[in-house]
Image: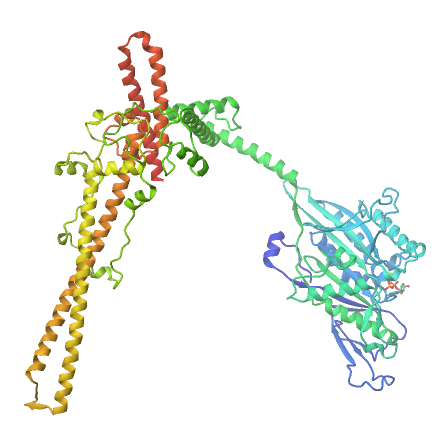
Amino acid sequence: MMRRKNGNKHDFTRMGTRKKVHAFVRVKPTDNFPHEMIRYGDDNKSIDILLKKDTRRGVVNNQQTDWSFKLDGVLHDASQDLVYETVAKDVVSQALDGYNGTIMCYGQTGAGKTYTMTGATENYKHRGILPRALQQVFRMIEERTTHAITVRVSYLEIYNESLFDLLSTLPYVGPSATPMTIVENPQGVFIKGLSVHLTSQEEDAFSLLFEGETNRVIASHTMNKNSSRSHCIFTIYVESHSRTLSDEKYITSKINLVDLAGSERLGKTGSEGRVLKEATYINKSLSFLEQAIIALGDQKRDHIPFRQCKLTHALKDSLGGNCNMVLVTNIYGEAAQLEETLSSLRFASRMKLVTTEPAINEKYDAERMVKNLEKELALLKQELAIHDSLANRTLVNYDPMDEVQIAEINSQVRRYLEGTLDEIDIINLRQIQEVFNQFRVVLSQQEQEIESALRRKYTLIDKNDFAAISAVQKAGLADVNGHLVGEPDGQGFGLGVIPFSFKPGKKIKSKKTFKDQLSIPVRKEGASSPLSTKELDISPSKTQLILPPRDGDVKDMRDRETSSTEPFPSDSPKEELRPPRPSTPPSKPVAFEDFKNERGSEINRIFKENKSILNERRKRASETTQRINAIKQEIDTTKEALNVQKALREKQGEYENKGLMIIDEEEFLLILKLKDLKKQYRAEYQDLRDLRAEIQYCQHLVDQCRHRLLTEFDIWYNESFFIPEDLQVALKSGCSIRPGMVPINRVVSLGEDDQDKFSQLQQTMLPEGPESVSFYNAKVKTEQKHNYLKAITGLQQVNKK
Ligand code: ADP
Ligand code: MG
């Protein structure tokens, strides 16, 4: 049985229902049916061909003489009615549910293919599958009042690899200017240029069929075509839309009714004994069809040669694939035709190996979808309105925002960023999205402003633009690391405070020297015998290591240390006493030397101390190792000497006293010595293990110190040469981030903007008198601090993420 309609395409595919092609045999009636040669199985599903030993063939005796073919049904003496019921009815009815269907008639010329497919056009009772299929389609459409179903038909003939439109003679079609071509697209295969005719009733469809049949006959005469060599494909296209407008899905399908060319073959040798000789098709395209069928039946083949000829190409999506497929093999019930009958039956059994996976061709009606969505949207808006009125939220608008509303949100965002607006009220989702949008707009505007402000004052060079950097370096404007060291016009941007450690005139050191100073020493300990962490006894009491101060330790440090330099600038009260800044900051290597001697001297001292402890421990470890090696050597020689003594004793004969062995003094001393050496060895080894643990710990501290030294230097460098003094002053000790830790461009831009403001204020307010300056100065500084704290809070949040 054919599958019944199933939910939708996806369900179907998921179930992966595969089914075989249905293959039937129809035997053409004859008066002298060879019962001894052709036998049907009791279930009417198998057919056996039995050949009596052919006396004429004489010599060949060992060849097969019996064949048995298992099929889906043998139609013997079957009426057109029964043939239709058996072969086509289900395929057609499933086509209206969206499944493609293909029915093909195959067989030698005169075996009844056309009779089966088209039938006798002059006798209604003997009409074939084609007119009956059309009738069934229209009958079902009438019954299916829930759907609007359209039917179209086309009639194609393939002769000698040329395509002919059997319906092109209709007055409204007219001859095509370009030859027809077979086109493939995701929806399937179609014939470009082939006329397709909408038919709203049975009668129209029949007219088209007759038109085509007439053309077939005429063409065979006028164009000298041998009609038995042509393939004819009549296609019924069905499109079914639900009359329920909310149903967006619709289905399409097509039924291909194929009347193939005669399948007779040519023997390779003479006519004698041709039954068992290899024979080839007269019609080449049938040979390609057979190849395609063999490939389709072979589960291992993934390439099917569809494009070898027009026939298989045109039928590409109708052979196998997702359609219901039926083959009717027409044979003669006559002894004289047994040879061709055998070939036809072989083809039929090959076809039976082909599996298909019928699936509904489901599509979506875009127009209906839009309409339905619009309806749903309107409904939801109403729903929201009700909800709002219940929740006392009046005047909430759910339509897209207009320019005025967006501008209002933009201004809210700006005020919020400035701090003049504490909160932005949430109204609805659209508004929230717009708020975020405007945040982005404002942010990018600010970025641009910052950049252009920077560009007004400085020459910005791309960090990766090496050519530009080297040019600037040549001009003496940038250090070796590509850091810009001032402005092209040579004017400082701060208030001109020089860091107290800065010594003008110092030469820039080479890159190598700087790197060398900061290079991390290669660790060598632990290379000879790695110790597991379990063995490590890390007790700080064993060493006199000094930990570098953390931010929180600053105060302790200052209490403890007597050093004249203040290690950290943030809470230094002597900030104001700094010498003025240089117009051009020193290069980093130079500055680093200064930093180590002055501001960073404390960290540097700790760093150096730890390093020297580390070196001392390393030295001791190496000495211990040497001692261990010496002891080991001595142990070995002592052992050897003992062995010699022992051998000597054994040679001389052993003395025993009450079960105790008696040994001489020399051997005894050697034993004592060995014992002592082993003890020493163990002790030294233990020392070495402890030392290694200390070295590891110490190394860690040295690394920490180095890192801290560099970090402090960077901060100091920024603060000393790049961050405006005002801003540093503005920052009170309450903040945990130090000015030098803030990315320089942010700090500088803030400073600059504020400075601009300051000069503007000075210009506009001076008329009030010089005493107003300090007032406004304070005001500006407060604002600066405010902005700066905001920037830092922002940064802290960014860092948290
Ligand atoms: P084909 O198309 O295979 O070359 P046709 O369908 O043209 O063969 O059949 C050849 C002749 O045999 C036609 O005159 C047709 O009417 C007749 N014929 C074929 N099959 C039957 C059948 N089952 N019953 C009656 N006549 C048949
Ligand atoms: Mg025919």
Q: Which residue is depicted at the point 81% across and 78% down?
A: 276
Which residue sits furthest right? 222
| Residue 780 sits in quarter | top left
Task: Check the image and report above or below for 328 versus 714.
Answer: below
Q: Would residue 336 be found to the left or right of residue 91 on screen?
A: right
Task: Please tell me which residue is depicted at 18% across the width and 72% down the height of the picture.
Answer: 633
Up/down of 30 relative to 82, above or below: below
- Seen from the viewer's position, the closer of residues 628 and 272 is 628
Residue 593 picture quarter: top left
Is residue 82 visible from the viewing direction of this image?
no
Q: Measured from the top left, where is residue 187 in percent x and y?
A: 69, 49
Residue 349 image offset from top left, x and y in percent: 74, 70
Residue 628 vs residue 405: left or right? Answer: left
Residue 27, compared with residue 541, is above or below; it is below
* Residue 669 image offset from top left, x and y in percent: 7, 78
Q: Quadrant of the C terminus?
A: top left
Q: Nearer the viewer, residue 62 or 738?
A: 738
- The answer to whether residue 300 is seen in the rendering is yes
What residue do we see at 43% from left, 34% from top? 471
Q: Is residue 213 left or right of residue 605?
A: right
* Left or right position of 513 against 141: left
